[in-house]
Image (spheres, grey):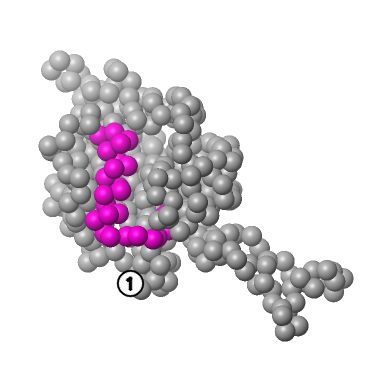
Amino acid sequence: MNRMRAFLITLLAALTLLSGCSAVKTSLKQTPTLANAMGVAEIPERDLRREYVNRQSRFVEVNGFNIHYRDEGNPDGPVIVLVHGIMSSLHTWDVWTRGLADTHRVIRLDVPGYGLTGVPDELDVDQFDETLLLTTFEKFIEELELTRFSLAGNSLGGYISAMYAARHPERVEKLILLDPVAYPQEVPWLFKLATHPAVKPFAKLAMPPWMVTLGLEEVYGDPKKITPETAKRYIYMSQRHRARESYVRTLEMLKEASSRERPLPFGNIQAPALVMWGKEDHWVPVKLAERWEKDIPNAQVKIYDGVGHIPMEEAPELTLKDALAFLDQGSLIEVPTPTSDTEDLEAILKGDNGTEDIFAPLEGIQ
């Protein structure tokens, strides 16, 4: 076993130092030591906190996890909770948070297993499963005493958000899902590699930054949009204590869930739902948007050309604009403009006092 481990580490070092791909070049700039570059080192939590905790950061004990979250924006505004996806952190919502802060109270968290929440030492990684994630999120909402709010979730966070909205329909005002996972699909090659029986023990031991960066390049429609700071954040978070274990375990969960049909309760969702999808998503194919639109009673879909798996990070301004419109109106349906030759339309647009009211068709939309 030790001989095999030594061989794998040596092989990894050779690949890391000799490969000329852009993912390796990017990752090496962000990892100052060979141990970090090989993905076998851990970055102390105090250093990660120094880098990624700010004045809005809070920590709360929930279901055995010390959850890192931020509570920002307008304290008197409607509440929206933002839930990130796999291998990510609450920082993926930075632009959305700034755009929502004037009108909304914005709460975002590091999902258990990720970011600065991570995995407690006491938890057996085999117990880190879908039930634990869903239950912990429910208890997080209870801890913050939230009774009525909107939800936005990406990828795994989209699944968590949709499941919460289905289980607690009376609490969710509006629902935004960005490239969510749930339905059977072809599993990305990176999932297959990391969970392969011959690779899995090694993946828990070492996750080289170039592999993290390669995964990041895959989830962007245009990898040129990845900034050095973004790549650094993903790499640093992957070197948190026990991060590799939770990453591999999550990939196992998603691989299993993607392999079979199963009953899902999305028909119970009462909130208006906006399903955003990057057309260039190589991890969760855009064709699955039709399933979500069909299964959620009041859902509409918006596709973004040239965008990958994390639209709110790759195309933040565009998706934020649509999110704000949806949160305000409950729909992205555009109001038609009257023309001189459409008397019927003009009649519809007349208010009770005879004046034109172009917002009349939107009355009743919550």
Quadrant for residue 132, please give it: top left
57 and 38: which is toward the camera: 57
Is 272 rendered above or below residue 345? Answer: above
Q: Work out whether 8 lies above or below 340.
A: above
Residue 40 spot, x, y in % from top left: 19, 33
Residue 294 coordinates in the image, percent (x, y):
59, 41
Count of numbered tags: 1
Tell me residue 69's x, y (percent).
26, 56
Three-letter code for the amino acid on which mark 1 is drawn = Pro
Q: Which quarter of the figure is the N terminus placed in?
A: top left
**Residue drawn at 31 percent across, 66 percent down:** 72
Specify the segment rendered in magenta.
128-155
How crowded is the residue under tag 1: few (<14 C-alpha within 10 Å), some, or many (20+)? some
The quarter of the picture where residue 181 lies is top left
Is residue 25 in view? no
Residue located 32% across and 60% down the image? 146
Quadrant in which residue 340 is drawn:
bottom right
User: Front-most of 207 and 105?
Assistant: 105
Q: Residue furthest right?
A: 341
Q: Quadrant of the C terminus?
A: bottom right
Horizontal relation, residue 306 to residue 100: left or right: right
Q: Secondary structure at mark 1?
A: loop
Residue for point 42% across, 54% down: 170
Is any atom of residue 332 visible in this view?
yes
Residue 118 position in % (x across, y down): 22, 44
Question: 333 left or right of 336?
Answer: left
Q: Is residue 263 magenta?
A: no
In percent of the image, x 67 and y 72: which residue is there? Answer: 360
Is 152 magenta? The answer is yes
Q: Which residue is mark 1?
A: 75
